[in-house]
Image (tube, rainbow, N blue to C red):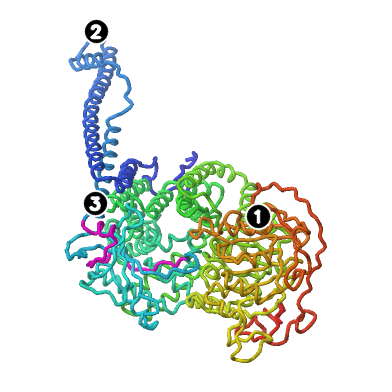
């Protein structure tokens, strides 16, 4: 055979081609349209009125019956031409026979009756015009209509369960009810979120069916209504229970197994959307363990026992392996910390935690061996060693899939994984690659009819798209790579990862408004460890109830590949260009899908030219790593010579002060770790000698893990008021885990870090920590201490000098503390840059703003925040002082540049000049007519008009000689570190310490 090999043979490892001859031919798409019709019918009917759905279903059934009748008629009509054609062929054969006989005996003509009949039938045939719709087309149309009607009817019946019974009406009235519930899902803790200055505590959430409801009037109704249960522990000052009692209560609720019946007293509230899967949300304030009225089923008890055994076997592992291994095996993500979960999302590895089909396939591979050998005589795995036939292997594999569903719970992700496993088993039974797509379509059809709510599940959509890509796109892409001399195994893995990412990326963009650039390489690297971690994890799952030491040994072995997967996720997520923003919603998803389709033919041409491939790989590496020089040239960010940057961290504060190459002083970290981490990465900050947290509100400290991630941090300095206590404990715990000491700020404390010098102006020292130089009388009280009665008023206030500029950072001080600050520091005068207190709220002290008279006012706040920050009257007051106002909610990150004579700011790559008009802003302050830096104040542009990006406004510079302030004298002289008390080591620092050291190097001074 010298011809070109077919695609399936080109992808085969054997030189003789693929071993399965049934793999030839186009894909069988007959079941795809009915499955999509059922899916669409379910999606539409779940939010439609029941009467309209009934009418539509009747219409669809009627049209289907009509299409079937037309198909039957067409089929009968098509039989006549077929019979005529057969008769014509018989006539031609008869004429040929007569011709032969005539040649043999010309004088004996023979005309048989059969030939005469054939001629008459052939002559009676009339030519007919071709029809566009054949009988088969009408049958397919009928199947589509019937499946759409079935999907719509099933969805309407399931939606009626949500509206049935008294619970929806009680939820609309926010009534208190007593309900008997049957648990249907595993309880899990929600992820804490920052709302304003507070972090919402995690609550326990699980799904359940209400089987008996007692209304406030005492009426009892038996129902089957789906609900969502939210359990919040009773807190506050009245809760006298210790941590152990509260932990025991939480464990009792978290230990509920599916099928358990409990009785609760709750308040019913309506769901967020009328089209939600639940009829009501039951809010429970728990002060006691749940009251059980029914035990779980034996299967669920067995599954719960196995899951608990796996958790116990992983208790001795390292944190990442301990958290990840139960998720890889049975989808138990209860131990996965938020930062690891974020890393998995950024690298598109979350399918590993959702019990994807690949996990089940790995387990089945132990039975059947590699899928490409499953139907051949030389197949591997346990099945041939046990003497099992192909059908017996498929049956046992199906039993394993059902056991997998029981142990991992019948959640949508688990059902999708089981469907993928059954598809593999069907392929083994038939040995036909082209049968996989119909099997997938049949699985989608059955699952949608069984649970129509899957039709609205994005996870279900992602699973179907990924599986379809593996069946349709991956073999072709693998063959294309192999034609370009890529090894077969590597080509298959690359093609599978790329195909799945190509079809799933638009859906991810719809949900998360982002596009990941490291998904394919991270999936390829993680895939190396998925199989050993899953196999060893399932072995530990089976061994835990029988021999716990054996299970612990197995989990120790499985911990190494699990840590590899976690390391891949964390490393990929830490790259500056791991993901980039993309328009969200269906519009953004459709645009990305169109762009992907347009890039596929371009990629084909690129693959034909090695130099283009190398260029594209280099461009991708640069886009992901984002080297600072290239990024600065392309984006203008960060601007060269920046002195301070207000990061765009949303509704919170995060400010960075440059202190040398890759070194900075960081003040606050915002509410989200990702935002401050991204900002520091963009600025190239790798060393933070001192990180100041002005106070313990969540919008200032919750981003601390992001600031610590991958950076050398010398110490964390906090305020003296440890309130709120929970968030103060969070800071101490996070710092302890990173081995970073925590110290408290002291008024009058002065430090130097490279070109930076700063002084702590506020808060006053509490009585147990006297300020430097203050009297030691225990009855004496520092000035302004009575103003510190809230976390905001305890904000650390810094006066910073850098490059001749003076910056005042007010934290979240309220007017009483602002007045006390002004009284405690009467020498305080005008500043160049002011970080406005409390995100620009209306609570500002006018005398302080008048005294400071900033040239540039910076406000850090989130877009569309519910608090109205910044307040219009605050902006008006600042502009009345001649200040230029910049805000992160509309301007993005703000960089401060220049000197006192040439102050400027860069916003979103555009430089804004702040000009000086000396006589406009000069005035006498009480006690002194000079600023702290020694110069006069300057005027500023009025208003806050944001110029177009890339356009520079022509602003004249009026040089005003302003002397550079002298650095504060350092104890030890000559900029040398003090010999005592290195802050870079564990432990607190006394007032007499002066040096800050990291790895033996002097990086700051404290006097």
Q: Residues within 10 Å of mark 3 (few under 14, many from 20)?
A: some
* Residue 380 is at least partly visible in this image: no
Residue 886 falls left or right of residue 163: right
Q: Nearer the viewer, mark 1 or mark 2?
A: 1
Under circle 3, the secondary element is helix
Q: CA distance from mark 3 to mark 2?
A: 87 Å
* Residue 204 is at least partly visible in this image: yes
Region of the chain picked out in magenta, as a range: 165-193
Q: CA distance from mark 1 to mark 2?
A: 108 Å
Residue 1003 falls left or right of residue 329: right
Q: Residues within 10 Å of mark 2 (few under 14, many from 20)?
A: few
Name the N-terminal-most of marks 1 and 2. 2
Q: Nearer the viewer, mark 3 or mark 2?
A: 3
Please name the residue that numbered disc 1 is placed on. 907
Please name the residue that numbered disc 3 is placed on. 160
Quarter-of-image position of residue 530: bottom left
Q: CA distance from mark 1 to mark 3?
A: 53 Å
């Amino acid at each position: 055979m010298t011809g070109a090999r077919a695609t399936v043979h080109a992808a085969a490892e054997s030189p003789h081609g693929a071993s399965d001859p049934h793999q030839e031919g186009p894909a069988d798409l007959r079941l795809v349209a009915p499955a999509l019709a059922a899916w669409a019918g379910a999606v539409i009917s779940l939010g439609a009125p029941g009467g309209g759905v009934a009418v539509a279903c009747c219409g669809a059934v009627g049209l289907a019956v009509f299409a079937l009748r037309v198909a039957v008629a067409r089929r009968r009509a098509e039989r006549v031409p077929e019979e005529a054609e057969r008769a014509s062929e018989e006539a031609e054969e008869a004429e040929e026979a007569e011709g032969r006989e005539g040649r043999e005996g010309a004088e004996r003509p023979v005309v048989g009756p059969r030939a005469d009949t054939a001629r008459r039938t052939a002559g009676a045939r009339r030519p007919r015009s071709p029809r566009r719709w054949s009988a088969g087309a009408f049958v397919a149309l009928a199947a589509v209509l019937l499946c759409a009607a079935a999907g719509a009817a099933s969805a309407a019946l399931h939606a009626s369960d949500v509206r049935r019974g008294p619970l929806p009406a009680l939820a609309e009235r926010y009534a208190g009810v007593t309900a008997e519930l049957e648990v249907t899902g595993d309880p899990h803790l929600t992820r804490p979120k920052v709302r304003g200055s507070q972090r919402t505590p995690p609550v326990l959430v699980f799904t359940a069916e209400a089987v008996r409801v007692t209304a406030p009037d005492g009426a009892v109704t038996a129902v089957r209504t789906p609900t969502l249960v939210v359990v919040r522990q009773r807190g506050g000052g009245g809760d006298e229970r210790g941590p152990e009692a509260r932990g025991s209560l939480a464990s009792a609720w978290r230990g509920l197994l599916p099928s358990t019946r409990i009785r609760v007293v709750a308040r019913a509230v309506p769901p967020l959307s009328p089209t939600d899967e639940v009829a009501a949300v039951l809010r429970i304030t728990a002060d006691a363990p749940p009251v059980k009225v029914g035990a779980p089923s034996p299967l669920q008890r067995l599954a719960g026992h196995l899951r608990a055994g796996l958790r116990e076997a992983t208790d001795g592992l390292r944190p990442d392996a301990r958290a990840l291994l139960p998720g890889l095996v049975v989808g138990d993500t209860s131990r996965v910390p938020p930062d690891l979960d974020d890393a998995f999302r950024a690298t598109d590895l979350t399918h590993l935690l959702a019990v994807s089909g690949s996990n089940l396939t790995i387990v089945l591979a132990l039975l059947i061996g590699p899928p490409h050998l499953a139907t051949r005589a030389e197949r591997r795995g346990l099945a041939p060693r046990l003497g099992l036939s192909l059908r017996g292997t498929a049956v046992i594999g199906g039993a394993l899939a059902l056991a997998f569903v029981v142990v991992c719970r019948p959640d949508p992700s688990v059902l999708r994984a089981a469907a993928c496993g059954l598809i593999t088993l069907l392929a083994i039974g038939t040995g036909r690659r082209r049968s996989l797509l119909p099997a997938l379509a049949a699985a989608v059809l059955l699952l949608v009819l069984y649970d129509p709510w899957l039709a609205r599940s994005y996870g279900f959509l992602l699973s179907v798209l990924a599986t379809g890509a593996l069946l349709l796109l991956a073999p072709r892409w693998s063959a294309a790579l192999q034609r370009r001399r890529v090894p077969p195994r590597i080509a298959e893995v690359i093609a599978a990862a790329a195909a799945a990412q190509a079809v799933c990326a638009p859906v991810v963009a719809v949900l998360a408004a982002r596009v990941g650039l490291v998904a394919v390489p991270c999936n390829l690297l993680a895939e190396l460890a998925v199989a050993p971690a899953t196999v060893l994890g399932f072995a530990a799952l089976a061994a835990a109830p029988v021999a716990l030491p054996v299970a612990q040994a197995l989990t120790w072995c499985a911990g190494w590949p699990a840590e590899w997967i976690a390391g891949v996720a964390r490393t990929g997520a830490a790259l500056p260009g791991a993901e980039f923003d993309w328009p969200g919603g269906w519009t953004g998803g459709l645009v990305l899908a169109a762009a992907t389709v347009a890039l596929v033919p371009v990629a084909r041409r690129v693959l034909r030219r090695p130099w283009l491939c190398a260029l594209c790989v280099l461009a991708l590496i640069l886009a992901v790593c984002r080297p600072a020089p290239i990024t600065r040239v392309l984006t203008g960010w960060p601007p060269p010579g920046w002195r301070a940057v207000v990061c765009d961290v949303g509704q919170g504060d995060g400010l960075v002060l440059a202190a040398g190459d890759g070194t900075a002083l960081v003040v606050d970290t915002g509410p989200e770790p990702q935002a401050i981490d991204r900002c520091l990465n963009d600025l190239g900050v790798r060393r933070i000698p001192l990180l100041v947290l002005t106070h313990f509100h969540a919008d200032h400290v919750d981003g601390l893990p992001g600031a610590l991630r991958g950076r050398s941090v010398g110490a964390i300095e906090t305020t003296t008021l440890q309130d709120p206590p929970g968030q103060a404990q969070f800071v101490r715990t996070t710092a302890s885990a990173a081995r970073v000491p925590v110290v408290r700020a002291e008024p009058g404390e002065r430090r130097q870090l490279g070109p930076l010098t700063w002084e702590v102006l506020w808060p006053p020292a509490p009585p147990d920590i006297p300020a430097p130089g203050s009297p030691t009388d225990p009855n004496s009280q520092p000035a302004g201490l009575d103003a510190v009665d809230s976390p905001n008023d305890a904000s650390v206030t810094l006066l910073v000098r850098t490059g001749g500029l003076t910056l005042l950072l007010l934290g979240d001080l309220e007017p009483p503390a602002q007045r006390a600050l002004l009284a405690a520091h009467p020498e305080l005068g005008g500043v160049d840059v002011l970080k406005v207190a409390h995100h620009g709220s209306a609570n500002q002290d006018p005398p302080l703003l008048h005294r400071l008279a900033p040239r540039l006012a910076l406000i850090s706040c989130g877009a569309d925040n519910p608090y109205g920050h910044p307040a219009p009257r605050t902006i008006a007051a600042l502009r009345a002082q001649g200040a230029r106002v910049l805000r992160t909610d509309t301007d993005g990150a703000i960089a401060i540049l220049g000197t006192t004579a040439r102050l400027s700011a860069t916003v979103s790559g555009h430089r804004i000049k702040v000009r000086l008009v000396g006589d406009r802003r000069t005035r006498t302050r009480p006690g002194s007519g000079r600023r702290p830096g020694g110069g006069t104040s300057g005027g500023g542009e009025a208003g806050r008009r944001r110029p177009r990006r890339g356009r520079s406004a022509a602003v004249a510079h009026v040089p005003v000689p302003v002397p550079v302030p002298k650095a504060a004298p350092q104890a030890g002289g000559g900029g040398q570190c003090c010999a005592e008390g290195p802050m870079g080591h564990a432990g607190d620092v006394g007032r007499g310490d002066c040096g800050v050291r990291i790895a033996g190097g002097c990086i700051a001074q404290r006097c």
